[in-house]
Amino acid sequence: MRATKTILMGAMRRTAAAAACIARVPLNGHRRLLVASASAAAAVGMAVAVAERGVCVTEGREVKIANWSNTHNITGTLYQPSSMKELEALVRHCHEKEIKLRPVGAGISPNGIAFSEAGMVNLSNLNQLISVDEATGRVRVQAGMRVSELVDALRPYGLTLPNYASVKEQEVGGLIQAGAHGTGATIPPLDNAVTAMRIVTPGRGSVEVTRETTPHLLDALTVGLGAFGVVAEVTLQCVRAHNLEEHTFTASRAEVARNHGRWLRDNKHIRYMWIPYTDTVVVVTNNPTSKPKGVVGEAVSETEEARRLRPLRSLLVDRISKATAEAQERLGLDIELVDSLNFAECRDWLLKFDALDTDHVRRVNRAEARFWENSEGWAVGDSSEMLQFECGGEQLVLEVAFPTGTLDNLKSPVPREDRSIPASSQDVAFVVDLLDEIESRKFPAPAPIEQRWTRASPSRMSPAASASMDDVFSW
């Protein structure tokens, strides 16, 4: 369970600025921190040129990198090779010189696992579609290709990935190495789509592992967190491109508990967004359809959208008007801009006031609940579009995954006499218990607590690893 956002580290450039600079790019109306590069003098002073067996490896340069949520950052040496030979030479050089080297992709991971002061390697220059087998649906890509780039490259072939995480700006190598997942109780995490992989290892150079010839090795290395080497190329099993019809609605906690098993079975993709301190759960389903792309029913007018946003905008205007001029300037707030803000921007600005004040967070959550209660609707679009969603602003993220039985036999929860809502399955009971704990302790928890599901993964290091592929995991 988590909320997700992204940054685009593929946008990094090799040129040093004359002064320290921070590169930012827009994504769904928000800015994401990418790289703060050192001054020109410092960058030149820190450059590390690697020449290995006649191959000139890309220069390393000192950069400051922040992850997608801006909760971890580091200043270290970054390498961006432009060919397989350069990558192999770099890995070999670092191995022989005992230099720690970590693969870093788009910086999606909230834990900073890819960061290393000694050395980081980014493959954004190795981002090409290598081959497409239209008969089998298998595609070969370089690991530095972003998922969004892959989606565009596959469109002429009528292919797409079997599922998507909440954002599409991951690099393919990071997508599979970190065990990224979408939602759908019959669909495994995305590492299951890997049928072959070329990984550049410290001790054995380039190694090709495949589902047909080395299945156990592939399962061991696919979700590897960059620990076994640098993934350079990946073969993915794709599916035919298709449209999904999305239905967004709200339900009470008791309604979710009563209907959960049926909803999980009846919908190809489903996720819940539980809102603390309210009895509102946002339910989003996506199912295959032959309908054309577009809003089902009448499109939402500007007037209707303003009505839906009124609870959040009104609360924001109230808080800004009561804030001192100093506080407004410090927080970057402008009351004249409120009517131009979308849902996620309103919530971000509201939480800037005091994210640790439980009463304030409770009011924000209740305003958000009213927004969603007024926002039921249906829409149709390509699966790569419908399964991506706006996650909001900067957040500290903690994600857990656990088995919850099978679709035909969801695990019963641990009995608890004081559970606020009766729950017949372990996954729903987990969130109900979490909400009970949050609310009894008056913990300032903003929305949402997001819950998704996948089928089990064959990858040994996946959080959803299981001997039985029929197992369902809650995230």
Image (cartoon, rainbow, N blue to C red):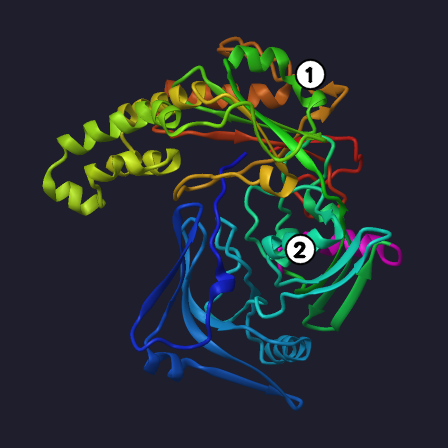
Between the C-alphas of marks 2 and 1, the distance is 35 Å
Residue placed furthest toward the right: 213
Of 376 and 450, nearer the camera is 376
Q: Amino acid at mark 2?
A: Gly
Local secondary structure at mark 2 = loop
Q: Does dot 1 land on a helix, a strand or a loop?
A: helix
**Quadrant, the N terminus:** top right
279 relative to 473 in the view: left or right: left
Question: Residue 361 occupies which quadrant of the picture?
Answer: top left
Q: Is residue 145 left or right of residue 66?
A: right
Please give left or right for residue 440 compared with residue 237 in the image.
left
**Residue carrying label 2:** 224
The residue that appears at 68% across and 39% down in the rendered structure is 464
Quarter of the image for residue 453 reads top right
Residue 136 or residue 52, whichever sits in front: 136
Return the residue nearer the eye: 343 or 353: 343
Q: Position of residue 172 (x, y in %)?
A: 64, 56
Q: Position of residue 457 (x, y in %)?
A: 73, 41
Q: Which mark is residue 262?
A: 1
Q: Position of residue 194 (x, y in %)?
A: 75, 52
Please report the bounds of the magenta region as a residue range. Answer: 212-226
Q: Position of residue 284 (x, y in %)?
A: 57, 26
Q: Is residue 225 magenta?
A: yes
Residue at 61% across / 78% down in the picture?
A: 90
Asked whether residue 208 is drawn in magenta, I would say no
